[in-house]
Image (cartoon, rainbow, N blue to C red):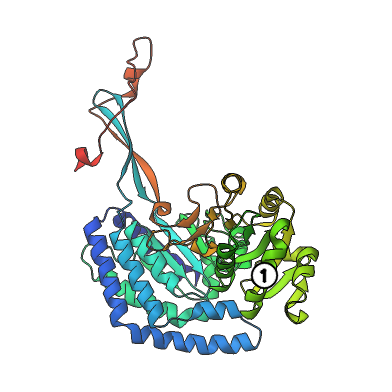
Amino acid sequence: MAEDVESKVKVAKKAAIGLASVSTDVKDMALENMALALDRQRKVIIEANAADLLDAQELCEKGELSRALVDRLKVDDNKIKGMIASIIDVINLDDPVGRTLQALELDHGLNLYQVSWPIGLIGAIFESRPDVVQQIMSLCLKSGNATIFKGGSEAMRSNRAIFDVLVEAIEETEGIPHGAFQLMETREEVMDILKMDSYIDLLIPRGSNAFVKFIQDNTRIPVLGHADGICHVYVDNRADLTKAYDVCFDSKVQYPAVCNAVETLLVHKDIAGAFLPEMAKRYLDAGVELRCDEASYDIVKGIKALKAVFRATDEDWNTEYNDLILSVKVVDSIDEAIDHINSYGSHHTDAIVTGDTASRKLFVNLVDSSSVMVNASTRFADGFRYGKGAEVGISTNKIHARGPVGLEGLVIYKYVLMGNGDVVADYAGPDAKEFTHKELNMKYTDLIG
């Protein structure tokens, strides 16, 4: 098994070299072919997904698979339509490869160029959501990165169907090296992948916090992503309550099973009495279970049967529910809200609802999260909504890429030095030449073609 995995990885690693220099026109043609293939093969994909859903539902009923994973698994016509739209958006994005980030004259005729370049071979390991295959493949293709995919067993048929449709379309495009994209399908292959730090340049895990932490703890390969999605909305005492109702409701209810859904609602004490009764009613009517601190519990306990309103424990502030469950806390000040977010949050996405300029500025400056929203739902934290076409994932890292990671997070850079027989010896010793270190308004492609 390990030898089979290694052979696939070696093929992809070799293909990565060629893929890095494929022209934008060829990559865009391959992407267009991917979109057309998805449209033609809808029936094949949906049938494969239906079989996965049937098995997943049985596992869910046995308590062996969470409802959140089942919800993320479904692929229908609308999901395929979204996948196609995402590919078209990637086509319309600028190619991130080969950009001159800096041009510097070291001396006359000796020019240094810092050039954006693909990372190389990326490993994508994910649970459920089969559309991750399309999202990551389209972004990695456009950014010139070969990719190893390993999805969860609950989506094996769906992943294989989508992968086969897309790879066939890519490899029928003249100019794309074969073998750049590989699919692994067994649980054992995950451990093999995690050991291949001599081949794989970056791992992107997408799934539960336990899943991501397992990946992070069991590999020497750099990992891009986040373990937790503990997001907050803080309703300030200067908030427009109409806006606050909408933002808070959307942040939790629009799609509760994802990492950018709000898990804790913080409300300033001065407006809690006016805001929470109506807000709690809207949540409860939508089937949301509330976990309240003492102050918020006293306000909402009489609205509906107590079976949907509970007292929060310390564990609730640290919990990513991925479900119609919300913890609620009344705070004395915006400073307390910020301190709570920075202490208990996962630095993913946090929002403030306020009409006050000073509060807005303080929140944006002091909340240490990859996305900070002002009078807007946390659900906007998404690569597609951020205009990236799609995303390979959301990163809470502070090195290389942060927030929803699109094309710009899939390139690094290399240095290209253009000389004319120059040697370092000329710049050493008592008669050493001096470097000019002058910025140039040039692109390295102007010289190398």
- Residue 435 visible, this orientation: yes
Q: Nearer the viewer, residue 297 or 133?
A: 297
Kindly indicate the quadrant of the structure image that contains residue 289. bottom right
The residue to which callout 1 is attached is 326
Residue type highlighted by circle 1: Leu
**Label 1: element kind:** strand
Residue 341 rendering spot, x and y as whole percentages? 66, 54
- Residue 319 visible, this orientation: no
Quadrant of the rendering where the C terminus is positioned: top left
Is residue 122 rendered to the left or right of residue 257? left
Write the residue at 62% across / 75% down: 282
Write the residue at 50% across / 79% down: 73
Kindly indicate the quadrant of the structure image that contains residue 140. bottom left
| Picture layout, residue 310 above or below residue 112 | below
| Picture layout, residue 226 above or below residue 127 | above
Q: Nearer the viewer, residue 202 or 234?
A: 234
Is residue 443 rendered to the left or right of residue 67? left
| Picture layout, residue 81 above or below residue 409 | below
